Image (cartoon, rainbow, N blue to C red):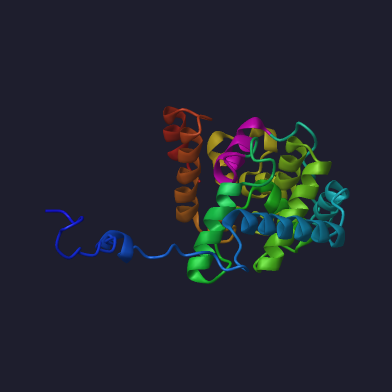
Amino acid sequence: MRGGHGAGPVTPLAAPMTSKRTASRPHRRRWPAWSWYPVELVGLALAVIVAATAVTWMVTPSTADAMGLVAAKDGAHHTTTVGTDQLPRQLAEALIATEDASFYHDHGVNVEGIVRAGVYDARHRCTCEGGSTIAQQLAEDLYLNGDDGTVGGRWEDLVLTLKLETHLSSTQVLDAYASELYLGHGTVGVVQAAQVYFHRRLADLTLAQDALLAGLPQAPSGYDPIDHPQLARLRRATVLHQMVVQGYVTAAQAIQATHAPV
């Protein structure tokens, strides 16, 4: 019988039971007052990048004289600068296929290539991976003496490339690059290289010869067709393959050029 008048002693009400699940639930971890959320960290990183870019932009030289520097370099080596619309289409395609497949789309900076190179360098604790575009290589050659082997040098190269893009069109960048390249055997620029290696004018080169020249910038001495004809042949085949992959030539054209003598 429940408690009431005339009933026995009343049993006190039991204290409300606490769920084991509730009691054992850990407190949520709260961010300390000084912690920053990821969005704020990203904002800070962007602010640092913008500030660093602005400072580097001010302290690095103007690139308005780029074509003048190319002409002076060619003059010192007694060769001719490639003029507007004078670079043969096939040679231009060979250079693009080999050195910078996204040349007409990356606006001088290949973000994917930079990230890939940065990851590689971070893993190997060096600044040894490439990823440079044609415009970056031009800026490096003209303003950094061909060397961007430090983090600071790479940042300067990047900013100088952005400057170049404000002064030169894509066609001018490609013409300047083809004019000032060191292509081995003492040659500078594609005009001089065509004469030294093939005794031909630039406009008279074959597909095989265009591909051979386009393969030289990576290692001019190593792929020199006079001193290392077999390595030059292998490198030429690589360039021709890249031209096929990117749709510049057919497989049949590439095979025919592969069998041409060096």
Q: Nearer the viewer, residue 198 or 17?
A: 17
Q: Residue furthest bottom?
A: 125
Q: Nearer the viewer, residue 3 or 99?
A: 3
State the extent of the magenta-drawn residues as a range. Answer: 88-102
* Residue at 26%, 62% in the rendered image: 20
Residue 241 drawn above or below residue 160: above
* Residue at 47%, 48% in the rendered image: 233
Residue 43 drawn above or below residue 97: below
137 with respect to 250 (left or right): right
Q: Residue furthest left?
A: 1
Q: Nearer the viewer, residue 195 or 121?
A: 121
Q: Position of residue 50 (x, y in %)?
A: 75, 55
* Residue at 61%, 46% in the rendered image: 110
Q: Residue furthest front?
A: 6
Q: Position of residue 68 (x, y in %)?
A: 87, 49
Counting labels gives 0
* Residue 225 in sight here: no
144 with respect to 120 (left or right): right
Residue 248 magenta: no
* Residue at 49%, 69% in the rendered image: 124
Instruction: Examine the image and state in which quarter residue 184 appears.
Output: bottom right
Q: Position of residue 27 (x, y in %)?
A: 42, 65
Q: Which secondary structure dominates the residues rendered in magenta?
A: helix
Residue 94 magenta: yes
Q: Nearer the viewer, residue 23 or 163?
A: 23
* Residue 110 in sight here: yes
Q: Position of residue 245 (x, y in %)?
A: 46, 35
221 with respect to 66 (left or right): left
